[in-house]
Image: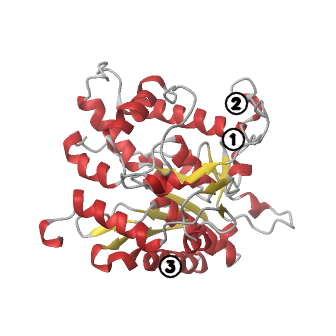
Amino acid sequence: NQVIEMEHILQPREPSESKPTEELFPYLAVNGWTLESIDLLFLPMLKDGMEALGSMGNDTPLAYLKKSTPRVFDFFKQLFAQVTNPPLDSTRESIVMSLECMVGPAGDLSKTYEEQCKRLRLKSPVISEDEYQSLVTLNHKGWTSVLLDMTFPISDGVTGLEVALRRLASESEKAVDAGASIIVLSDRAAGPSRIAISSLLGVGAVHQHLVKTAKRMSVALVVDSAEAFEVHHMCVLTGYGADAICPHMALSLISSLNLSHPDLKDKSITDVQLFSKYMQSIKKGMLKVMAKMGISTLASYKGAQIFEAVGLADEVMELCFTGSASRVGGYGFEELAKFSLENHKKYLASPEML
């Protein structure tokens, strides 16, 4: 059997010690998390295993009109089939829907041979910490991975973002040429002296560059992100080319909240069980979004770019989201970098960096 199952490469690790929520606050804030998003969006996912329910209508201001610092995810709107009833019902027709997907080098699609089957099967695009670490250290059946740093030095200023994105694109092409089967983009190096690149910009820049150089089908693209945690984030990342997503800040927060939050009163529930509920809510949400476009499998949704942007400049769309529409221009790389710098200085920078 040529197919690589996650169970074959999984290397379970000892769980790390949970950090108090107070220690995570600066990292949560700098990545766009708010108390409102934790209480109204994140906690219901852990308690109920589904997205929080709300009334019809969305009165959230457009990203470029927000007083608070917008995230790149906020500029994107999901396109839906323009019909009165959804093309698919993700609950009643779940038997024809799936988030399972094969990732990695695809081979020559015009031919049929055994090596084509040597791909990694993922049950879901959202992966756990153990699965992520197993992919980062992968060395199995000739498959190897390369870890690329999705941060840039604070000293680079407002020009650092675009330079870092072009560096990521170049490094990803070199990794493919060197024979890597998996490229991992990670923002874990972010800290007092380094700023995290938005995971959506990083994924978009690398995906588009590899598509333009005809090398995208030779590699799997994994993103390790502190800012992604809700269904919309996972959908946009998948829609712009991510094969797998590890929401590492969300996973850290699950352990932290299970330790201290009063709403999670049942102390017999483990971190693993809470993560399972979180995964269940993400899966349900992604299937619901796919159903609204009549898409039944993740393979058809991934990289399809079924979004439009509102408020991003042409330079951003061309480099990271080629082919998507942004009918109302707006923020370019320098403005987005300025937002990141301001947030970083406010929450995370050490005194000597100010």
What residue does disc 1 label?
290
Alpha-carbon neighbours of circle 1 within 10 Å: few (<14), some, or many (≥20)? many
Q: Position of 153 compared to 60: left or right?
A: left
Identify the residue shown where x is 74% and y is 50%: 300
What residue does disc 2 label?
90
The Cα–Cα distance between marks 3 and 1, rounded to whole angstroms, is: 31 Å
Give the quadrant of the C terminus: bottom left
Its colouring scheme is secondary structure
**Of callouts 2 and 3, the N-terminal one:** 2
Q: Position of 142 compared to 273: left or right?
A: right
The Cα–Cα distance between marks 2 and 3, rounded to whole angstroms, is: 39 Å
Q: Disc 1 on helix, strand or loop?
A: helix
Q: Position of 287 compared to 345: left or right?
A: right
Identify the residue shown where x is 45% and y is 30%: 45
Identify the residue shown where x is 47% and y is 64%: 185
> Which dot marks residue 265?
none
Find out whether the residues at labels 2 and 3 contact each other: C-beta distance under 8 Å.
Answer: no
Q: Amino acid at mark 3?
A: Arg
The percent coordinates of residue 172 (x first, y second) are 54, 75
Residue 149, visible in the rendered structure: no
Q: Disc 3 on helix, strand or loop?
A: helix
**Of callouts 3 and 1, the N-terminal one:** 3
Find out whether the residues at labels 3 and 1 contact each other: C-beta distance under 8 Å.
Answer: no
Find out whether the residues at labels 1 and 2 contact each other: C-beta distance under 8 Å.
Answer: yes
